[in-house]
Amino acid sequence: MATRLESLTDGSTQTSENTTMVEVVTDPARLRDDWVALAGRASISPYQTYSFSWSWADTIGRIEDVQPFLVVARDETGRAAAILPLCVQQRAGLKIALFLGGRESNFNLPILDPNAHFDEASLRNLLRRAAKVSDDPPDLIYLRNQPRRFEGVYNPLAFAEARPSASFAYGATLPARVEDLGARLSKDARKKLKKKEARLAELGELTYEHCATGARGDAILEALIRQKSARFSDMGVDDAFGRGVVTFLKRLQNETGDRALELHALSVGGRIVATYAGIMRGGRFSGMLNSFDMDEEIARSSPGDLLLHALMRNLVSRGMTHFDLGTGEARYKNAVCDETIELCDFVLPVSARGAVAAPLFSAFLQLKRRVKQSPGLSRAYYRARRLIGRAK
C-alpha cells in the first residue's frame, strides 16, 4: 500500500518538490532488495540487517504473533530513502508498534539514506502518516533502546524529548594492534588474568576457539544454551530459551553472510567452560550472548573473562574496528569497554486509545529504569524472582 506524503522534510501540510511516497509493508520479503540496498548506505548496527530482522520475525516474532509494520519512504524516483523496521504486537489490549528484533536487539535504529536529510519533524510526520495509511494501524509507537548517536552519526529518530532507556550499552573502539589492546589494562589487571589462566590450566589443557562452524559450532551453541539456562534458573528465570530463541539462534548460526552467528569458546581438557556469541556488520562485532560453566572450581578462575579478552584479541587481529557488549550493567563490561552508549525510549500515541494509555506506559518505563539503575532495588527484584522460582 502507498499514499502521497506531503513535505516529509519539514512536517508541514503544503506540497513541495520534496513530496515523498510512504507505504507500510507487512511482508519483509517484498522489501528485501530495497532493504539490502539502503542498509548498504545507511549507518546501522548489525541488528538492522535484513537477514537478522527477518530471521527474528520468522521465528520469535511468529511465535509471539507480531505483525511486521515496515514504514517505507520513497523518493520521487521510487527508491527507498527510509525504512523504519517496526512490528505490531498486542499488549494489554493495545496495538503497539515497536522495533523488529524485540529483546534480542540491543540497538534500534532507522535505516536512512544519508543523502536524504531526514530530521525529527519529518520522521515524526512519517510515523503518523504511516499509521493513517495502514489497514491495521497501531495505537502506540514505542521506540525503544535507540542510540542518540551511533558510530559518530546522529540519529534523528531519537527525538529530543525521549527519555533515557532502562539501561546503557557498552562498547569500545578497537586499536590497530593486539599489543595496544593489552596496554589498555593496568599491570595489576594483566597479572590477575595470567594468574587465573594458569590456575584454570591446572585442570586441563586450555583451548580458545574462534568463529567455530559445523559440528563444533553446534557443540558450542548447545553448551551456551545449557550454561545460560543453568544461570537463569539460579536467578529464578524459567524457560530462558523459550519463545523460539533456540530456533532463532540456530537459524542465525546456519546462515551465511551478515546473518552468521559467530561462536567463540574456551575449553579445558575438551570441556567447554565459556562461550560468546555475536553478530557482525562491517567492522563491528556485537556480542549477543555469553555463558560460563558454574562449577565452582572452574568459575573461580573467571573463564568468561579469559575468553572475552581472547575474543577481543581475535577481533583486532582480523582488523575489526568496533566492539560492543549490548545493554545492561555488568562488571565485566566496564573492565573492557571505554564507551558508554546512551540509549533512549520514546512513546508516540497515534490513536485516541493510545493517547489515553501513553502516560501510563511512560510511567512504567520510568519505574523500570529506576529499578535497573538502583543496585538495591535490582538486587531485591532478582532475589524475589529467585525465591518465587524455588517456591514453585
Image (cartoon, rainbow, N blue to C red):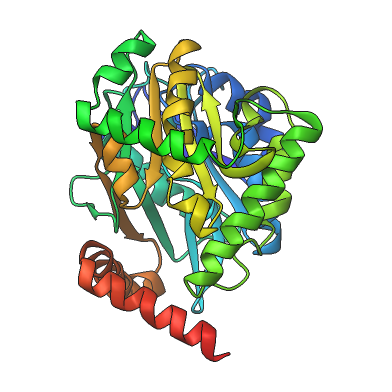
Estimate the x, y position of residue 159 in percent, counting from the top left. Answer: 24, 45
In the shown orientation, is residue 381 left or right of residue 377? right
In the shown orientation, is residue 268 left or right of residue 299? right
Residue drawn at 53 percent across, 58 percent down: 294
Residue that protrudes farthest toward the front in the picture: 202
Q: Nearer the viewer, residue 181 or 375?
A: 181
| Residue 378 seen in the figure | yes
Q: How many marks?
A: 0
- Placement of 126 over or under 353, stated as above or below: above
Q: Nearer the viewer, residue 382 or 154?
A: 382
Estimate the x, y position of residue 322 in percent, counting from the top left. Answer: 38, 22
Q: Quadrant of the C terminus?
A: bottom right
- Placement of 205 over or under 223, stated as above or below: above
Q: Nearer the viewer, residue 138 or 305?
A: 305
Residue drawn at 72 percent across, 25 percent down: 256
Q: Quadrant of residue 210?
A: top right
